[in-house]
Amino acid sequence: MLQKSTSEALSSKPSSMRPRTPLLVHMALAYLAVFVATAAVAQFLIPYDPAAIDLKARLSPPIGWGGSLAHPFGTDELGRDMLSRLVLSIQMSVSIGLGATGLGAMVGTSLGFIAAHLRGWTEQAILALIDFQATMPFLILALAVLAFIGNSLAVFVCLLALHGWERYARIARSLAISANAQGYASAVRQLGAHPLHVYWRHILPNVAATLIVSMTISFPEIILVESGLSFLGLGVQPPSTSLGAMVGYGRDYLVRAPWILMMPSLVISLMALSVSLIGDWLRDRFDGTLR
């Protein structure tokens, strides 16, 4: 009986010592859920036309600074409703961030798998391209591309996808080489499976956790880069708007109407902090050496 009770206590110990999700991670998940939900149903949340100009209500303060319920977040220099523009900017920034992150992850992972599979001079060429991308200042590359090709939403998303793709390529290559050295990939290949089937159905699911953590790190970086380019006037062009564009518009009214700059800046900061917290938590959850 003593031996049985001891074994039961040992078997129940891991479940009782299972780490709880930190409160900050719960708060970050809740904020991101609201952030993404706002982007998904933005058209139903906008109380006014974001491009509607009302010079009579120009630079109206938000509630708490002497404003009214007609414009709870105040108005900008042209009398446009800040709440409507903020919701539309969140939708635009989320769309750009998700599109660029997904495209960059797809390109980088594919090149990493190609390098791990073909090896030889193909691998060396891809590694040289990775090193070139890692050493090239992205702002200079962005300025050159936008100057020669011009700016559009599709070009802008593809350009942002170049930011960080080398990270996915390095991770995918190293993990694919490790997976190929293990028995399951070799066994499936010896059964006559096509290489695409091996990488898609067997190797990718085993390395997806690490790639997802990398995406959580890359997503806020892309949002910040988009905000910086839009701040400089090189990002989203009028009449569309983004969080970075709103910050750029508000810099000239920082003293007279600081809410124009503060509100989108606060949204960007909280979003980057939330994704970083979730990324660190996912890394700890997926890394068996930290348990």
Image (tube, helix red, strand yellow):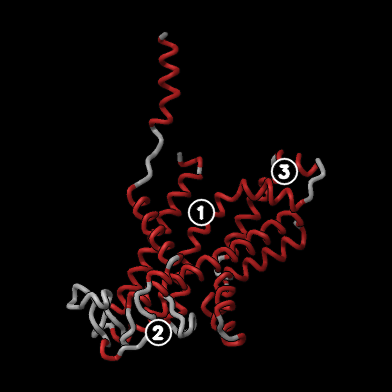
Q: Position of residue 133 (x, y in %)?
A: 60, 70
**Measured Cα–Cα span from mark 3 to mark 1:** 23 Å
Q: Quadrant of the C terminus?
A: top left
Q: Are marks 3 and 1 in contact (CB under 8 Å)?
A: no
As drawn, the label of residue 213 is 1
Q: Are marks 2 and 1 in contact (CB under 8 Å)?
A: no
**Which sits in the foreground, 174 or 3?**
3
- Indicate the amino acid at tag 2: Ala
Q: Residue at x 59, y 50 (%)?
A: 208
Q: Position of residue 283 (x, y in %)?
A: 48, 49
* Disc 2: CA contacts within 10 A as few (<14), some (14-19) or many (>=20): some
Distance, label 3 to label 2, CA atoms, is 55 Å
Quadrant of residue 14 in the image? top left
Q: Which residue of the protein is positioned furthest toward the bottom in this rendering?
A: 55
Q: Residue drawn 27% across and 88% down?
A: 58
Task: From the top left corner, tell me how far across and down residue 276 is, in percent.
Answer: 42, 58
